[in-house]
Amino acid sequence: MAPPLLLILSLITIFNLPSLSLTQLLSTSYYQHTCPSFSQIMEQTTTNKQINSPTTAAATLRLFFHDCFIEGCDASVLISSTHFSKAERDADINLSLPGDGFDVVIRAKTALELSCPGVVSCSDILAVATRNLVTMMGGPYYDVKLGRRDGLISLASRVGRNLPTPQMSVTETINLFKSRGFSVQEMVALTGAHTIGFSHCKEFSSDIYNYSRNAQSDPSYNPRFAAGLRNACNDYHKNPTLSVFNDVMTPNKFDNMYYQNLPKGLGILKSDRLMVSDSRTRPFAELYARDQNAFFKAFRSAMQKLSLYGIKTGRRGQIRRRCDEFN
């Protein structure tokens, strides 16, 4: 006797479950019933933190990017090291991540645990905090799908050259983004995050001091700007925390001024300045420099895509009780 059609359809459904995109399990209304106060708590926490610490937005945006590019958007960067394991946050490139980014997540998690314990993941908190803060700074609003679970792995050894650095060539940076499914245009749009925030002097010191036998600084800098950077970073050996704004014109506003600065030699990092000299990236940098709406549209789309990269669901993750340690 042939098996009932309903049974056949059920078996097909079961065996096809693994092929479903993980992003289909996420929703913007994920916490609507399990944590109705989620959005309100997130809005209050991010607003209060940004008002009291104006560097929070840039810090959180950078933290989010550093999280997503290693194990995926799973809050692995928030884990603290132990005597037995050196976590992502203690990899050399992550030691300069500002504390305000970590702090806003901890504050939100604390408030959410009081309201709806054991429900909201740290990875969802970081994703929404980033979006809220970008919007507060004047940047584009974008929907954030929710339902991520927190990762179970955080190892400094996995960071390596898996994050872009100022010293990378355009080709290296393009290949790094390509390996994660991002196009050149998406890469240029995401780099626009440098419109807010700052860079430590040690990250570009080789470009402004004793650059070559014939030049004190990289000739791609505006000479007066390079002189100003040397003056601002004069004591960076004694004070490694010395830093300068990435966008010296409108540092506290999320806009397209960052792109307008690049052809003028006002880009802080070499990797940024190279974008206007490479034929693969220049058209997008020029487009975003003259059209802020085009930049915002591209940034919005790229951030939504980034926020879903490498997400964990089901048994591949957990809802941490504390964001800095595994359960």
Image (cartoon, grey):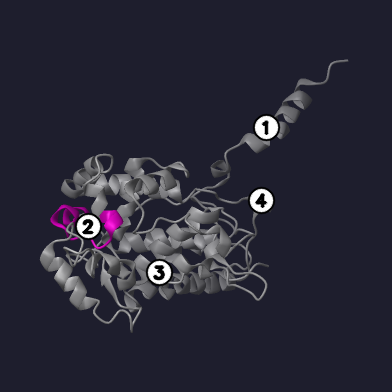
Q: Quadrant of the N terminus?
A: top right
Question: Are dots 1 and 3 in contact, CB under 8 Å?
Answer: no
Which sits earlier in the primary sequence, circle 4 or circle 3? 3
Where's residue 260, x and y in %?
A: 17, 54
- Closer to the observer: label 3 or label 2? 2
Mainly helix, strand or loop, the magenta region?
helix
| Residue drawn at x 13%, y 61% as measured from the top left | 222
Q: Is residue 273 above or below residue 91?
A: above
Disc 3 designates what residue?
Answer: 46
Residue 121 visible somewhere in the drawing: no
* Amino acid type, residue under disc 2 in the picture: Tyr
| Residue drawn at x 60%, y 72% as measured from the top left | 81
Disc 1 designates what residue?
Answer: 16
Q: Tell whether position 267 is magenta.
A: yes
User: Gap in Å between the C-alphas at discs 2 and 1?
Assistant: 46 Å
Quarter of the figure with residue 66: bottom left
Disc 4 designates what residue?
Answer: 314
Q: Tell whether position 43 is magenta.
A: no
Classify 10 Å Cα crowding around label 3: few (below 14), some (14-19), many (20 and above). many
Which sits earlier in the primary sequence, circle 1 or circle 3? 1
Q: Residue furthest right?
A: 1
Where's residue 150, x and y in %?
A: 59, 59
Quarter of the figure with residue 232: bottom left
> Which range of residues does the magenta coloring cover?
257-272
